[in-house]
Image (spheres, helix red, strand yellow):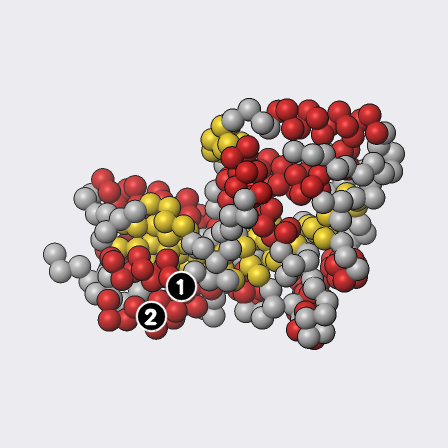
Amino acid sequence: MTVTTTVNGNVSAATASAAASAAATAEATGPQSLTMAKALNTAMADAMRADSSVLVFGEDVGMLGGVFRITDGLMAEFGEQRCFDTPLAESGIVGMAVGMAINGMRPVIEMQFDAFAYPAFEQIVSHVAKMHNRTKGKLKMPMVIRVPYAGGIGGVEHHCDSSESYYAHTAGLKVYTPATVADGYRMLREAIDSDDPVMFMEPKKLYWSKDQVDLGALRAEHDAGTSTEGRAAVARPGTDATLIAYGPSVPTALAAAAAAAEEGRSLEVIDVRTLVPFDDETVCASVRKTGRAVVIAEAHGFASVSSEIVARVQERAFHYLAAPILRVTGFDVPFPSPKLEHYYLPSVDRILDAVDDLQWED
């Protein structure tokens, strides 16, 4: 890979070059154990090396490396003009990114927590989502808004919202949410490459999940133009029923499928990956095969992405269904205190109970 780092701020050319060289050497050694946090960090670093128009900014993303350290080391390598801290003003952060995107840059911005993004909602809905259409295609909006979201970390309200439905409902936005380490890398690279705005929803509880990942293979895949956009993945094949999940709920769905297998029931798990655009083909093909489905999501069930998935599958696969589609979601209440979190979140037991209710003849 050719390093095209622009040296800015108080970082010397020697320091930046050494950091880039060390990163490239350390990450080009074949399969290795990697966290999702590191995969996301590497995706941003690779994008910044490849394209000098890519900028990263937000609250505490520079010197601190972000609350979850996802941007750790980026300021050291690329300088404070390409990775920098902003005031605590989410609306201003997004508004500035809009101006940058209009003028040929590719901003990648971080909202510290899901609910912290709400002050920027007007900017996102009125300007980010509509600019391309408003200008009849003359202006593009190549920007990524990274949002750490959902629960599972023992946080409280304002820190554990599942806000994906707001963005999925907003025409003009793409909505991605990775569930695996490899997808964290490949989907963030694709989001940064996109000429359309992407809400990149990062499951906080999966930041420290680990997997064996070949970064060299992922980079080659990216360079070849392979895309996951609008393409769900069959995370586990099965024949008896389909579990449809995304983001933080995918590992729970996989655990439920593993538990069901011990009881002789074969459950297929679909990882939706991109909520917008949505992969009707893969999801519905699975339900047509199994005849039964459960949709799993941490967000509230009412007027949600899970509601939309049920509607889309019912419209396209109604005559293949052996039972009504069921859902396992967060309850329709504000996110609870840490001691009550495990009651609120979808669990293996709740999923298996839903599967048992799918009108089995036996």
Residue hosting label 1: 280
Tell me how many marks there are.
2
Amino acid type of the residue tagged 2 in the rendering: Arg
Quadrant in the rendering for residue 21 = top right
Q: Residue 43 location, x and y as percent?
A: 62, 41
200 vs 138: above or below? above
| Extreme residue in the front direction | 224
Whether residue 6 is visible to the viewer of this picture, yes or no, is yes
Residue 146 falls left or right of residue 80: left
Residue visible at 73% across and 48% down in the picture: 54
Residue 347, image x and y in percent?
Answer: 38, 49
Q: Name the spot of residue 277 as percent of width and height, x first.
A: 50, 62
Asked if residue 349 can be seen in this view, the reply is no
Badge 2: residue crowd in 10 Å (few <14, some 14–19, many ≥20): some
**Amino acid at circle 1:** Asp
Q: Mark 1, residues whose alpha carbon is within 10 Å: few (<14), some, or many (≥20)?
A: some
* Residue 276 percent coordinates (x, y): 52, 62
Disc 2 to disc 1, C-alpha distance:
8 Å
| Numbered circle sitting on residue 52 | none
Q: Quadrant of residue 118?
A: bottom right
Q: Residue furthest right?
A: 10
Lateral position of residue 78 relative to residue 29, left or right: right
In the foreground, 92 or 56: 56
Q: Helix, strand, or loop for circle 1?
A: helix
Q: Which residue is mark 2?
A: 316
Labels 2 & 1 near each other (Cβ < 8 A):
yes
Tell me the quarter of the image containing the N terminus: top right
The residue at the point 28 percent across, 42 percent down is 259
